[in-house]
Amino acid sequence: MKPPEVDRVAASRAAVAARRARASVKRAVNERRLSAVAVLDTALSSTESVEATMRVRDLLLSIPGLGPVRVDRVMERLEIAASKRLSGLGVHQQQRLREFLLKRAPRVEQPEQSRLVVLAGPTAVGKGTVSTYIRENYPEVLLSVSATTRAPRPGEIDGVSYYFIDDDEFDRMIAAGEFLEWAVVHNKSRYGTPRTPIDEALGAGRSVLLEIDIQGARQVKTAMPEAMLVFLLPPTWEELVRRLIGRGTESLEEQERRLTTARVELAAQDEFDHRVVNRDVRAAAAEVVELMQIQKAIDLHGKE
Ligand SMILES: Nc1nc2c(ncn2[C@@H]2O[C@H](COP(=O)(O)OP(=O)(O)O)[C@@H](O)[C@H]2O)c(=O)[nH]1
Ligand SMILES: Nc1ncnc2c1ncn2[C@@H]1O[C@H](COP(=O)(O)OP(=O)(O)O)[C@@H](O)[C@H]1O
């Protein structure tokens, strides 16, 4: 029998391969939708063109994944008659059709080239410890520094652990669109991921690790579907409670509040792409980095 780690790595590889296949299908659909927009533009700019005589229905049917039933429903929603040709569309119909084609098209990017990894999990599971280990031992990975309205704990350094800011500054950053995501965590303080350092690092081909809560992980997945979500698990519930109490940084009331959130968060683990059990910090960190490297190897292969 194979040891469980081998199975886990094989399962991770299979999951990455499946994601890559899905990304490739998505790209094909994306290309088809964008070329449908090009057909629409040609039809509208020249009534003499072949495109002008094309029916809207046929244009929509040319998009993979849109069968006759869905096309009819879409056309009803866009308020376009079944027999309508592209050249006969009114201004608002053109606008609605264009919006439909563009909005439904995933962004033009190569999902498998991104190396944005989100590490989430319940309080005190060891997210901070594992991320710090990665920052110190794998300098090629950028660990994003979040902004928060919570007060610093003893030993935390502004600009390294977090950017400790007040509510007014947090409001300003939201209004200026400076966060990739933000959330109120443990019903108390606000935490947010500054967008610019991440864009810059990804642009330069570096891997980026976000250590954020589950609400934030969901927001990142929506904004950047190519992000890989990793859920860090405690070996047992009792060990999680022991780590929280052992850390000794929260009052009893705060510990209770965090454990209540932790139960809800553990229930969300299936939404994640991978799960890593934090028995040993070094091994857990290596497993997260291994997941990035599997991703990286596939990226390189994909580029050939
Ligand atoms: N959404 C979001 N969550 C964050 C961010 N930064 C930290 N968090 C999460 O906020 C929670 C509270 O963090 P912290 O106050 O350091 O205490 P912890 O629960 O003991 O780790 C943790 O679940 C972090 O993962 C962020 O930028 N965005
Ligand atoms: N693998 C591990 N084994 C034992 N203790 C751990 C492990 N990982 C983290 N801890 C301890 O658990 C406590 C919570 O870890 P921390 O990184 O602060 O969690 P989180 O950031 O998830 O809230 C800390 O006291 C830390 O030293």
Image (cartoon, rainbow, N blue to C red):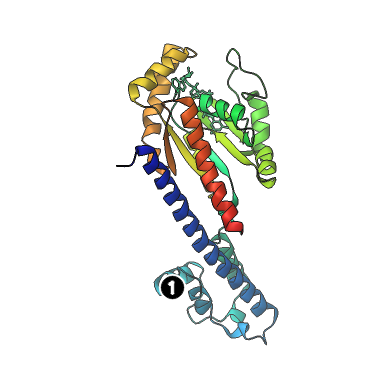
Horizontal and vertical percent for residue 251? Answer: 46, 12
In this picture, residue 17 sits left or right of residue 160: left
Horizontal and vertical percent for residue 15? Answer: 43, 50
Horizontal and vertical percent for residue 97? Answer: 57, 69
Q: Is residue 12 visible?
A: yes
Q: Is residue 19 above or below residue 68?
A: above
Q: Can you tell which quarter of the image residue 4 is in?
A: top left
The answer to which of 27 and 72 lies nearer the viewer is 27
Q: Residue at x 57, y 47 (%)?
A: 296
Q: Is residue 176 visible?
A: no
Q: Residue at x 42, y 51 (%)?
A: 14
Q: Quadrant of the C terminus?
A: bottom right
Horizontal and vertical percent for residue 231? Answer: 44, 36
Residue type indicated by callout 1: Asp
In this picture, residue 43 sits left or right of residue 6: right
The answer to which of 52 and 4 lies nearer the viewer is 4
For the residue labelled by badge 1, is the local secondary structure a helix, a strand or a loop? helix
Q: Dot 1: few (<14), some (14–19), or many (≥20) neighbours within 10 Å?
A: some
